[in-house]
Amino acid sequence: MKIPLPTTRRKARIEIIPLIDVIFFLLATFVMVSLSMVKNQGIRVDLPSAATGAPQEREIAVTITVTKSGDIYLNKEKLAPDLLPQHLKQLKAENPDIRVFMNGDKEAYFGDAIQILDEVRAAGITKVAIQTKQGEPLQK
């Protein structure tokens, strides 16, 4: 009969390589999930830059986009210009404290943007912001 000696037993050890793999996987997953949480309501356009722009709260908001070709989008849905006032009045009726974010291509026709701003105000919506990207500081 063979009796094992206590000194010949192997000690348990923690393998660090699989632990590092799991940590990197969790880190990559967290980064991907947090990037997908950014809520982009409008369509992608080339925004004009502004040095004095400030971030706005986007809790209860809709986005109106004017493209370079003059198309109008409410959030990501293309609308005919004559249907925009109806949609705005409906949104105002559903939520009296709604905010409107206007964004448009920097080469869009300025008259289209002013007409949309006028329709937003005619619908009774007073909280309006114009989206820009961060620009260079003003030179004096």
Image: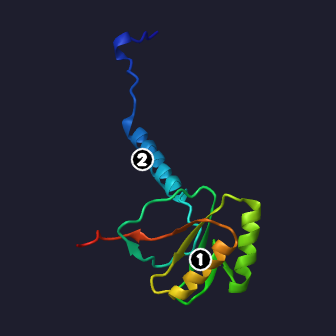
Which of pointers 2 and 1 lies earlier in the amino acid sequence?
A: 2
Using residue 56 as the reference point, say whether residue 99 is left or right of it: right
CB atoms of marks 2 and 1 within 8 Å: no
Q: CA distance from mark 2 to mark 1?
A: 48 Å
Label 2 belongs to which residue? 24
Question: Which sits in the foreground, 63 or 130?
Answer: 130
Using residue 110 as the reference point, say whether residue 5 is left or right of it: left
Using residue 61 as the reference point, say whether residue 29 is left or right of it: left
Q: Amino acid at mark 2?
A: Phe
Q: Amino acid at mark 1?
A: Leu
**Which mark, by number, is residue 134?**
none
Question: Which sits in the foreground, 139 or 80?
Answer: 139
| Residue at horizontal 41 percent and vertical 12 percent from the top | 4
Question: Which sits in the foreground, 122 or 76?
Answer: 122
Label 1 belongs to which residue? 117
Quadrant the C terminus occupies: bottom left
Few, some or many residues within 10 Å of mark 1 (<14, 14–19, 20+): some
Few, some or many residues within 10 Å of mark 2 (<14, 14–19, 20+): few
| Residue at horizontal 39 percent and vertical 74 percent from the top | 49
Q: Secondary structure at mark 2?
A: helix
| Residue at horizontal 38 percent and vertical 71 percent from the top | 50
Work out whether 40 lies above or below 26.
below
| Residue at horizontal 68 percent and vertical 68 percent from the top | 124
Q: Secondary structure at mark 1?
A: helix
Using residue 138 as the reference point, say whether residue 116 is left or right of it: right
Q: Percent x, y for residue 20?
A: 39, 41
